Image (cartoon, rainbow, N blue to C red):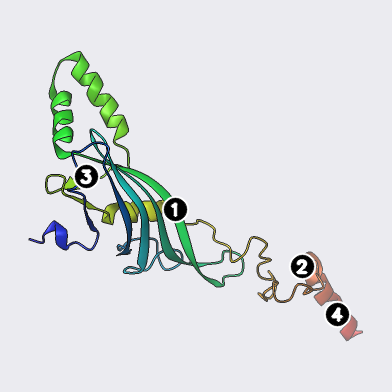
Amino acid sequence: MARTEDSPWAVSVAQVASRPGQSKEIDATFPAPSGIGDEIVGVDEGADVSVVGSFDSIVDGLILNARISAPVHAECTRCLKPIQRDWTVNVTSFFPYEDKSAAGKGGKAGKNGKEEEVDIIAGEDEAEDTYPLLDGGAWADLEALLRDTLVEELPLQPLCKPDCKGLCSQCGIDLNENPDHQHDMTDIRFAALEGLKAKLEGKE
């Protein structure tokens, strides 16, 4: 079985865990996990992802405040040109201590009204940006956090530039490179009549 510390996404936090008020800075590069987007928009597996921030210890766990930067590949939705751009996201995530999580589960099982209420509040706090600490709180593994954060923040309609003109709907030429390009428009509703007219004139 692989050890937690052997994971390329593992960060040692034992020195600040369970000691409220302590802080550990992080400035490191991690390989991008798999499953971040697709061939159209995404981050290539293994690409360098920068994480700069800090783990701050509170009574119930660790708070990670960080800036995540990753190289996103995309295709402009207007002109279809490939885009290579660093994408930066600010993230705040909670890593609760294992014993606190166990205590919360006990409250949920209880019949006491106060225990039920406390557990409901805890459950509301445990949103998608909550991740477990491993090995008794000694390690924080960032794999799931990186994947979740970057997938959520991928651009849905990436543009090579805000004022991209796109492609000509008639011939597909890039209008950014040919801004004066245009076509003489013919109403297709009369195309058949024009053809018939030409045939008739040809017979006369």
Residue type pointed to by label 1: Val
Q: Which residue is mark 2?
A: 188
Per the image, label 1 sits on a secondary structure element best described as: strand
Which residue occupies 42% across, 68% down?
A: 39
| Pointer 3 or 4: first along the chain | 3
Instruction: Provide residue 41's location: percent of width, then percent of height.
Output: 45, 64
Amino acid of disc 2: Ile
Give me the C-alpha separation between circle 1 and circle 2. 49 Å
Q: Which residue is mark 4?
A: 198
Mark 2, secondary structure of its residue: helix
Packing grade of label 1 (10 A; few <14, some 14-19, many >=20) is some
| Dot placed on the residue nearer the N-terminal end, 4 or 2 | 2
Q: Nearer the viewer, residue 126 or 21?
A: 21
Quarter of the image holding residue 159?
bottom right
Identified at 66% across, 65% down, the residue is 164
Look at 65% across and 67% down and name the residue there: 166
Q: Which residue is mark 1?
A: 89
Could you tell me which quadrant the C terminus lies in? Answer: bottom right
Mark nearer the N terminus (4 vs 1): 1
Q: Quadrant of the N terminus?
A: bottom left
Outermost residue on the right side: it is: 204
Q: Residue at x 30, y 62 (%)?
A: 33
**Image x and y of residue 73, in percent:** 46, 68
Residue at the outermost left position: 1
Q: Nearer the viewer, mark 3 or mark 4?
A: 3
For badge 4, the amino acid type reads Ala
Residue denoted by label 3? 16
Point out residue 152 in the picture as x, y percentages from the top left corner. 41, 51
